[in-house]
Amino acid sequence: MLENLFGNYTAEKVLMYIFAYGEGYAREIERTMNLPFFPVNRQLSRFEDAGILAGKLKGKTKIYVFNPRYPFIEELKALLAKAYEYIPEDEKERYYRLRNRPRKSGKPL
């Protein structure tokens, strides 16, 4: 939907993922969105270089979030929110449902 605006399909999916989940890292985005790792990692780096995303290290993993200092962040989020409304429900269920993180042994559901 927004791939022509953002330049490519991967860019759109990366931004929509960060919008939907609030944060993410390359391997997680790759697995969730069924995208190749290298383009996802390259796109995250491009967005970080442009100031749109900010990366922070948690151990060896670089977690990306929207950069609150980016001058058009509110407008970008509004655009992504509008685009999210038009995503079909089956696609939302497949890609944007709550993450399934590992659960501690013995922890109740």
Image: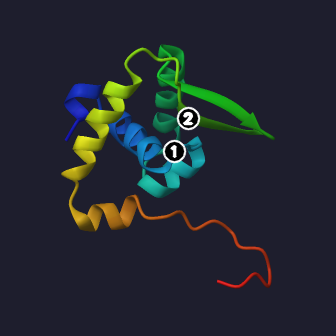
Measured as percent of width and height from the top left, residue 97 is found at 43, 64
Q: Amino acid at mark 1?
A: Gly
- Residue found at x 32% / y 61%: 92
The residue singled out by tag 1 in the image is 22
Q: Is residue 109 left or right of residue 91?
A: right
User: Answer yes or no: do the residues labelled 2 and 1 have beta carbons within 8 Å?
Assistant: yes
- Tell which of 86 and 10 is nearer to you: 86
Q: Where 45 falls versus 50 (above or below)?
A: below
- Residue found at x 59% / y 42%: 25
Measured as percent of width and height from the top left, residue 37 is found at 52, 43
Identify the mark at residue 52; answer none if there is no mark. none
Q: Amino acid at mark 2?
A: Val
Measured as percent of width and height from the top left, residue 83 is found at 23, 43
Q: Is residue 29 left or right of residue 89?
A: right
Q: Earlier in the sequence, mark 2 or mark 1?
A: 1
Count of numbered labels shown in the rendering:
2
- Residue found at x 37% / y 38%: 10
Q: CA distance from mark 2 to mark 1?
A: 6 Å
- Residue found at x 37% / y 27%: 74
Measured as percent of width and height from the top left, residue 54 is found at 58, 26
Q: Where 72 falls versus 105 (above or below)?
A: above
Say few, some or many: other residues with alpha carbon within 10 Å of mark 1 (under 14 / 14 to 19 / 20 or more): few
Say few, some or many: other residues with alpha carbon within 10 Å of mark 2 (under 14 / 14 to 19 / 20 or more): some
* Quadrant (top left, top right, bottom left, bottom right) of the C terminus: bottom right
Q: Is residue 14 left or right of residue 1?
A: right
Could you say which quadrant of the image residue 82 lies in? top left
The residue singled out by tag 2 in the image is 65
